[in-house]
């Protein structure tokens, strides 16, 4: 075909005219431009520079804490726990979720400290996390990631800016006060929330911490009524911790407490009134809101993070059973998205030994 | 077909159409897969939309799986109409492989997605209410392989679909062999 003196190339026996070739290239080129352009736009390669995406959080955590391969990008330091929730049936008034039927639901969970450094030294001022998965891995499981703080940021941007401002300066080992001041000036809502947090000094340890849901959720009853709810876990007098010290002081204490006997919390469902903020986690609800005691969480065992236990659970706050629904709180979808991004990244990294090793905690 | 409609220089026999059912399956999968791909790429880069789009994406994925299985059954039962004579032997071989790759990807992608969510230990619920069984063990390493595979298959789908559409468009516009018409639904027009 190429050696032929014929000037006109053919395809499939059809001579190719310039007009048709131009038309064909226009059609194919036009299609590819739209098709691949749509993919590139959707994938964030074009047009995403001005907005925060989940990967920005992963990068920011790495920038603040250095690489933490195999660990959660936030709340990297933690320990796995297990036990059960004994429902008294009171929660059924608000939600049809199986977990609120009177009876026992197994629970797996994880105590953690906020921050991306998986080997940071324990400090009582660091926010404490409790992630729980009720009924894991069943189809009606309920996951929640709580903090020992009544309020939180109210936007992904606020969280992101606070994270960047929290980077320890290489000279002092502490966050740059100027960066934090600039952050608080730019985010008065977080400044107010931090003031509220500051009013209650943190309890001595994990076992006597109250943990809050931070965000608002809708509880949907069997009759279909939807109620805005925030929940909290209120500690039932734990055994007094023995004084501990060292970089794992808080974790060591809770390991010894669980060894000496189960730790318990009351699950309180706080019912929002119409005037209460549903979409702003920096704002607490008034203290006199009705709260339903839905039952008791009992943690009976504690173990080092390893393959197949709570280490490998993403405590995505949007894994909800039928009977609990997402509210319009603008923090919920970003939390779900960023947790998923962290889970994906750490899943492909090789793991190393966690800082908290339960077997090494002396009796 | 009347000769005045066929204005191509080469005399090509008017192409036979796919059966109406095959054409319906084709366009249904095209729409679903386009939507699933675009939503999938979008959701992982959109903080505010992630939660809602994840439900939509998984629901479309479940539909894709059902439709593709039915489509494969239909494909086995119905031999497609012959290509126009403009498709040469070598091109024909390439097109056969392209079609096989497309079917394999369409079938594998929703299964990998389903297994990937299963491996995280999360419940697999589509359309917000319909629970599906978990088809992979709770295992973060299994999840990781499936998760990365899900992305690779998505890019392969983009490439194979782009090749498929480009080839059809090139045939239709350059060779005027009516390639696209085999798959279209003719809008009823008055006899002219």
Image (tube, rainbow, N blue to C red):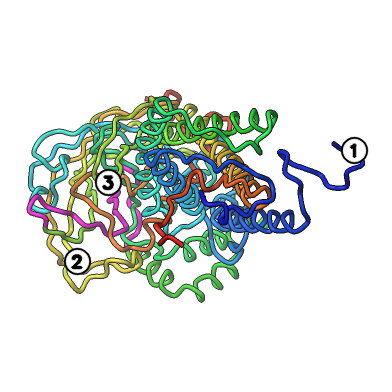
Give whichever of discs 1 and 2 has the lower sequence position. 1
Q: What kind of element bears circle 2?
A: loop
Is label 3 or label 1 in front? 1
x and y, in percent, of residue B5 in the image: 56, 55
Give the letter of the chain under mark 2. A
Location of residue A137 (image quadrant): top left
Q: Where A147 falls versus A47 (above or below)?
A: above
- Mark 3 closeness class: few <14, some 14–19, many ≥20 residues within 10 Å: many
Q: How far is the residue under mark 1 from the one under mark 2?
A: 91 Å
Residue B156 appearing in the image: yes
Is label 1 or label 2 in front? 1
Location of residue A70 (image quadrant): top right
Q: How far is the residue under mark 3 from the one under mark 2?
A: 26 Å
Residue, disc 2: A287
Residue located 8% across and 48% down the image: A90
Q: Looking at the rendering, in which quadrant would you find the C terminus of chain A?
A: top left
| Residue A118 shown left or right of residue A31 in the figure | left
Residue located 68% across and 28% down the image: B89
Q: Which residues are magenta?
A: A200-224
x and y, in percent, of residue A172 in the image: 64, 57
Disc ID at residue A4:
1
Q: Looking at the rendering, in which quadrant would you find the N terminus of chain A?
A: top right
**Predominant SS along the magenta part:** loop
Give the letter of the chain under mark 1. A
- Same subunit, tags 3 and 1: yes
Give whichever of discs 3 and 2 has the lower sequence position. 2
């Amino acid at each position: 075909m190429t050696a032929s003196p014929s000037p006109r190339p053919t395809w499939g026996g059809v001579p190719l005219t310039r007009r048709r070739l131009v038309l064909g290239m226009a059609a194919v080129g036009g299609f590819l431009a739209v098709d691949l352009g749509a993919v590139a736009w959707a994938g964030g390669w074009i047009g995403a520079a001005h907005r925060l995406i989940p990967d920005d959080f992963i990068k920011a955590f790495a920038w603040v804490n250095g690489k933490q391969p195999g660990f959660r990008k936030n709340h990297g330091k933690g320990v796995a726990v297990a036990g059960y929730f004994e429902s008294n049936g009171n929660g059924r008034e608000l939600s049809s979720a199986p977990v609120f039927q009177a009876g026992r639901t197994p629970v797996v969970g994880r105590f953690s400290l906020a921050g991306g450094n998986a080997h940071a030294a324990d400090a009582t001022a660091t926010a404490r996390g409790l992630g729980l998965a009720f009924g894991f891995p069943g189809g009606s499981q309920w996951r929640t990631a709580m903090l020992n703080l009544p309020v939180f940021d109210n936007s992904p941007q606020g969280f992101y800016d606070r994270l960047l401002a929290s980077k320890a300066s290489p000279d002092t080992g502490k966050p740059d006060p100027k960066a934090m001041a600039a952050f608080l000036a730019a985010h008065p809502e977080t400044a107010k929330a931090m003031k509220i947090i500051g009013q209650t000094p943190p309890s001595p340890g994990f076992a006597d911490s109250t943990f809050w849901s931070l965000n608002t959720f809708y509880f949907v009853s069997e009759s279909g009524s939807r109620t805005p709810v925030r929940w909290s876990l209120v500690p039932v007098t734990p055994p007094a911790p023995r004084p501990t010290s060292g970089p794992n002081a808080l974790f060591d204490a809770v390991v010894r407490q669980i060894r000496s006997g189960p730790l318990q919390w009351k699950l309180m469902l706080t019912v929002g009134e119409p005037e209460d903020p549903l979409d702003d986690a920096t704002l607490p609800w008034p203290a006199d809101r009705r709260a339903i005691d839905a039952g008791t969480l009992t943690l009976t065992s504690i173990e080092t993070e390893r393959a197949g236990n709570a280490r490998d659970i993403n405590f995505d706050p949007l894994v909800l059973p039928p009977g609990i629904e997402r509210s319009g709180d603008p923090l919920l979808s970003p939390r779900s998205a960023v947790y998923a991004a962290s889970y994906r990244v750490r899943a492909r990294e090789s793991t190393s030994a966690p800082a908290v090793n339960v077997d090494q905690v002396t009796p | 077909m009347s000769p005045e409609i066929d204005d191509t220089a080469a005399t090509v026999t008017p192409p036979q159409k796919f059966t109406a059912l095959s054409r319906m399956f084709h366009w249904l999968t095209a729409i679903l897969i386009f939507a699933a791909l675009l939503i999938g790429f979008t959701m992982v880069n959109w903080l505010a939309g992630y939660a809602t789009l994840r439900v939509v994406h998984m629901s479309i994925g479940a539909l894709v799986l059902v439709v593709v299985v039915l489509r494969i059954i239909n494909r086995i039962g119905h031999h497609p109409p012959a290509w126009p004579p403009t498709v040469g032997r070598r091109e024909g071989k390439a097109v056969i492989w392209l079609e096989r790759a497309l079917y394999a990807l369409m079938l594998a992608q929703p299964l990998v997605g389903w297994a990937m969510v299963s491996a995280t230990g999360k419940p697999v619920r589509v359309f917000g209410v319909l629970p599906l069984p978990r088809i992979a063990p709770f295992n973060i390493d299994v999840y990781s392989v499936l998760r990365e595979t899900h992305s690779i298959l998505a890019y392969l789908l983009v490439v194979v679909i782009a090749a498929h559409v480009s080839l059809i468009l090139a045939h239709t516009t350059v060779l005027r062999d009516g390639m696209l018409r085999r798959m279209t639904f003719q809008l009823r027009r008055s006899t002219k």
